[in-house]
Amino acid sequence: MSSERFHVRISKDYLVFCCAHFISYDGDQCEKLHGHNYRAAVELTGPIDENSYLFDFVTLKNYMRQITDELDHHVLLATENRHIRVEASDTSVRATYRHKEWVFPREDVVLLAIANTTAELIARWLARRLLSILRESHGFVPDSLRMEVEETFGQAGFYEIAPVKA
């Protein structure tokens, strides 16, 4: 058995998404609505194929751009937060935390099935979204997938998974 491991990493200037968000923390606190110029990067590990690569860079870049573009210029709201209630209609999204209330046009919001819009959980959401695309479109499952979400220079959250291969 070989101990070789192959990695590919994508980190491009266009894998950015500018979003507004707020999180709850310490059980009884809630941030003010604010924004970040997030930047994503992804790394895959696995064996190389008959073409001598792990996965095509161009295809991976295109998928990452597609996913980050889905979030760009939106308000990110976590739908599984214990402290922030989110109600969506066809025209608006209402979020409440204790006495605070925010109402946004529906088309300006991306609802994420996560507990909080932290960099770590956004990284997990991006990783799962990418993994789903890789499986469905290419039947490809890497040995591991690591996603980085930088919310400001020098401040990033990471998520790593070793997916179960079918």
Image (cartoon, grey):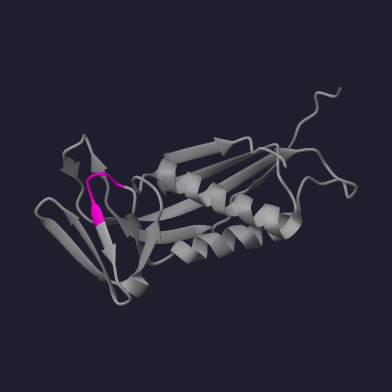
Position of residue 85 measured from the top left corner of the image (x, y, whole percent): 23, 54
The N terminus, quarter of image: top right
The C terminus, quarter of image: top right
Nearer to the camera, 11 or 140 = 140
Q: Which residues are magenta?
A: 81-85
Above or below, 163 relative to 51: above
Residue 83 in magenta stretch: yes
Q: Residue at x 59, y 50 (%)?
A: 11
Position of residue 117 measured from the top left corner of the image (x, y, whole percent): 35, 49
Position of residue 103 measured from the top left corner of the image (x, y, whole percent): 21, 68
* In the displayed structure image, the side of residue 23 where residue 145 appears, left or right: right
Nearer to the camera, 153 or 94 = 94
Q: Is residue 41 visible?
A: yes
Q: Residue at x 65, y 58 (%)?
A: 61
Residue 152 in magenta stretch: no
Specify the quadrant of the image occupied by residue 64. Answer: bottom right
